[in-house]
Image (cartoon, rainbow, N blue to C red):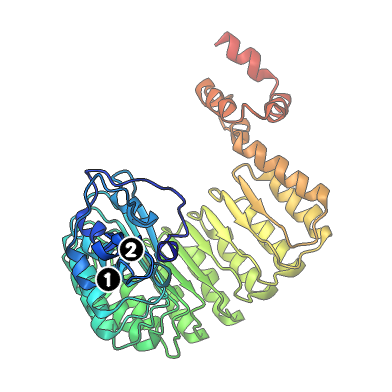
Amino acid sequence: EAHHQRLLLITTTSTMRLTPNFYPAMAAPFAPSKSSRRRGGAGGSPPFSKPSLMSRHLSPMSSWSLPHHLELLSDPNNKKLRLSCQKVGKDVLRATAKALQTHETLEELWLDGEGLDVDIVLSLAMGLRLNKSLKVLRLRNTTLSITSSGAIFNALKQNTTLKELHLERNDLGRHCIPSLASLLKETTSLKIVHIIHNPLGGTGIRMVSDAMRHNSSVEELCFQSIGIASPIAVELSKMLRDNTKLTRLFLVNIFMETPDLKIFFEAVQHSQTLKHLVITGNRISREASRSLGEMISKTNTLEKICLWGNELGWHGCTNLAKGVEENKSLREMRVTTNEAGDKGGRALASAIMNHPRLVVVDVSSNKMTAAVGANEWETMLEANTHLREVRVHGNRFTDATKATIQHYTGLNKAGRSLLTTETRLAPLALWAHSFASVGEKPQLIYTMLKEKPDLVSYGQTN
């Protein structure tokens, strides 16, 4: 019983008996030996201790039930499985890796923690090579040696169904990168790749970026806290220049000096495919912020940008605002925690006021005072009919200002822009759709009708 408790998966509490549809390969390690059955399981060897038991099959009518996570794996309706490697033990990992070879419904596998011995990794690699259902693989806190990482990455070259690969805290150093780079160069199925807290270093990211120049499938690439200590902008720029598929690039806590940032922003400016850029936890100097503003003013493809925690200051936010004034493509802009102050806050509000496409703006925690909120930001929202979400928490705005912001964004969600259409009145079909979308908030409809009272009579006569 104690052994069974150690094998429980934290994320599930379901229990079920074996059915004729169970997977024999998974059930084998959990069949009690004859000697343990005779002794009632007490005083003898644990039922899972002998390797020969791997080949035993349980009868479908057995009164024994699988540990919960393997019950889930044997359930054809289950699509996700998360295993804490140290909690479930190596027998379970071996059984899971073997079952993966023929499993037909599992779509997401998450392995967390140490415990992937070489034989388990080789079996897992075989499973990844043969499996036709898995779409998401997450390896977290699993130290991978050169041999282990090479086996997994080489196996994934032959996998045609996996869409997402998440590698977090796997101790992937520069010696493991060649096999990863080779995978990225050859894969035609992967869409999302996240590399987080792995010590790639400058050499590693240059190799990955070079491989991505030739990739034709990955749409989202994330580097986070990967220990860069050398210039990388040239390689990133070549990747953005040559890759025609990448639309989302996330650089989190990837420190780049001012010369590198200027090169990188110029590359983003000329990219014809990048739509979503995240660059956070950097220190963007005043000089680099001018390049950032120029990039924002000239890009015609970028739709979302997140600049959280880059120490822009009011100078940097002012340069950013100059770019926003000329921009025509942005739909979402997040400038959280950048010490904009009142000067930067005024510049941003002025730039956003007449932007034709922005829908989401986040300026939280930027040290703006109540006066800027009551004047510039309320005035901006009174004029802007497109913004549907504006986040300002962490500034010293009054509750009245926050309520005003919510009021106007609510009106915008309800279709306030229809009130300012150039024609006499927007088509009734648009009004009907707009009202239906906010039916649970009649006060918004009331406010809109109050601003445009001729709407009702015009609709009735036409």
Q: Distance between the residues labelled 1 and 2?
A: 68 Å
Would you name the residue on which mark 2 appears?
39
Q: Nearer the viewer, residue 380 or 184?
A: 184
447 in relation to 325, above or below: above
Crowd band around label 1 with a 10 angstrom C-alpha radius: few (<14), some (14–19), many (20+): some
Going 82% across and 50% down the picture, which residue do you hit? 399
Q: Is residue 367 left or right of residue 454?
A: right
Residue at image position (63%, 58%) is 362
Q: How crowded is mark 2: few (under 14 residues within 10 Å), some or many (20 or more)?
A: few
Q: Is residue 419 visible?
A: yes
Q: What residue type is labelled 1?
A: Asp
The residue that disc 1 covers is 242
Disc 2 residue type (three-letter): Arg
Quarter of the image where one finds residue 462: top right
Residue 416's disc number: none
Residue 411 location, x and y as percent? 66, 36
The secondary element bearing badge 1 is classed as helix
